[in-house]
Amino acid sequence: MHVTRIALRSVWKGPFFVPLPAAVDGSAVETMARSSTILPNHVGRKFLVHNGKEYLPVLISEQMVNHKLGEFAPTRKPFTFKKSDKKGR
């Protein structure tokens, strides 16, 4: 049996979220609250989540409910190998 996301936190505490301003004209909401839980009423809204350097756009879908906003804005740059020039050998 898999543990659901909602069961990871005490029932009496409820989900953690930061009160966000109302979206005006469908514009994105900038937030630094990466630990905020995505609630069902956020579905369809667009957030700009801070990753430590810039704000990354995140469009909330039904599958993202009960996850954290920070899960969808990576903070680290993926490693890539540098191509070396060995033409002189």
Image (tube, rainbow, N blue to C red):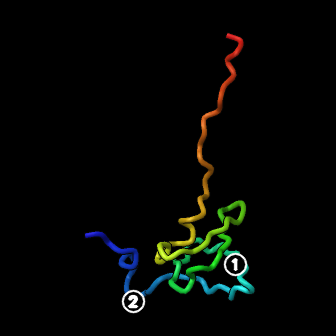
| Disc nearer the start of the sequence (1/2) | 2
Whether residue 71 is situated above or below residue 31 in the rendered picture: above
* Secondary structure state at the residue bearing disc 1: strand
The image's mark for residue 12 is 2
Q: Inspect the image, locate mark 1, and give the three-letter code of the amino acid beneath it.
A: Val
Whether residue 26 is situated above or below residue 53 in the rendered picture: below
Q: Residue 39: where, in percent of width, then height?
A: 52, 82
Tags 1 and 2 touching, CB below 8 Å: no
Q: How many marks?
A: 2
**Few, some or many residues within 10 Å of mark 1 (<14, 14–19, 20+):** some
**Going 70% across and 85% down the picture, which residue do you hit?**
23
Estimate the spatial distance between the alpha carbons at disc 1 and disc 2, rounded to whole Å: 29 Å
The one of 37 and 28 positioned closer to us in this rendering: 28
The one of 69 and 65 positioned closer to us in this rendering: 65
Residue 6 relative to residue 28: left or right: left
| Residue topped by disc 1 | 29
**Going 67% across and 65% down the picture, which residue do you hit?**
56
* Secondary structure state at the residue bearing disc 2: loop
**Few, some or many residues within 10 Å of mark 2 (<14, 14–19, 20+):** few
Quadrant of the image occupied by residue 18: bottom right
**Going 57% across and 82% down the picture, which residue do you hit?**
42
Q: Residue 81: where, in percent of width, then height?
A: 60, 35
